[in-house]
Image (cartoon, rainbow, N blue to C red):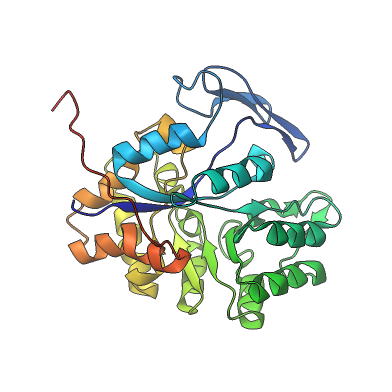
Amino acid sequence: MDYTIIDAHAHLWLRQDTVVEGKEIRTLDNGRSLFMGEIRQMLPPFMIDGRNSAEVFLSNMDYAQVAAAVITQEYIDGLQNDYLWEVQERYPNRFLCCGMVDVREAGYLEHGKRLIAQGFTAIKLPANRFLLPGGRVYLTSDEMMQLFREMEKNDILLSIDLADGDTQVAEMEEVIAEYPALRIAIGHFGMVTRPGWREQIKLARHDNVRIESGGITWLFNDEFYPFNGAVKAIKEAASLVGIEKLMWGSDYPRTITAITYRMSYDFVLKSKLLTEEEKVKFLRTNAKEFYGFKELIELPYIKNMSE
């Protein structure tokens, strides 16, 4: 491999302390968290203080030759806007950090406007969490569409995870039609192992939409490395929308409780089903162009002691 890589879907936090769907999520020790009624290994066990920091991630990135990463958010981690703004200012050439609004709270449009004014160039919406017990939040609601209007006007990228299958695809089609200049990155590779995933992929037939693979190793965890099913899904998605619409994402750090960070893309590099040109586009070029990364750091390969 003679090129560095871009990760289109990763997470950072200093501490998890939130409630989702009435259930608590809280950082414990040794990489574990109380997660909605059970204890889960949220981080690798050597991250004993529960801090999923930029500095630890940068060490992983340097080792794995990943030049830059998009830091997205999810309600299960709590709003991390304050910390991610610090990260963005401290490491502007390595990270593109997404702000996040909480649609479960009143006034999220004004919150979004404040994030834009602060300087965030991307906003994350975990729309898979919008199917709330007290009523569904539609992507086409008046307040949401006003937020999209503000984002398009200010060239703010939308990072979004959708509910399984085609549940929110029709809503997304309306948003795309109304705001054709709004750049949209759809996460989790359309929830690829769930029925109806191809309908999410097909949204990338629109010029302003891309698909990123954050969480694909989690979704294919049952088959495990080298994730042949995931590679076949990438090939199928490319046949539907073109390889230039697809981008690699790791979903770090949750995925590296089962595999190493390098393994989260190494299965793509080693696959014989993808051409070298397809690998370069998927792992680097597509994200570089879509997110607007400029000068990427060059990272040499460092041999392991076991080699």
User: Residue 57 sits in which quadrant?
Assistant: top left
User: Viewed as shown, does residue 208 lie left or right of 262?
Assistant: right
User: In the orientation shown, which residue stands out farthest toward the left?
Assistant: 307
Residue extending farthest right: 106
Q: Residue at x 75, y 62 (%)?
A: 113
Counting from the top left corner in percent of width and height, residue 51 is at 55, 27
Q: How many marks?
A: 0
Q: Which of 238 and 116 lies nearest the eye of the viewer?
A: 116
In the rendered image, the residue lying farthest to the front is 90
Percent from the top left, x then y, of residue 290? 44, 68
Q: Residue at x 81, y 60 (%)?
A: 110
Residue 238 quadrant: bottom left
Left or right of 262, for residue 139: right
Q: From the viewer's perspective, is residue 169 above or below residue 247?
A: below
How far across and down, in percent of the image, does residue 189 sit?
46, 57
Residue 31 lies left or right of residue 226; in this view the side is: right
In percent of width and height, residue 9 lies at 48, 51
Task: Mark yes or no: residue 206 visible.
Answer: yes
Image point (64%, 79%), residue name: 179
Look at the picture and state if 78 lies above or below 291.
above
Look at the image and tell me whether residue 224 can be seen: no
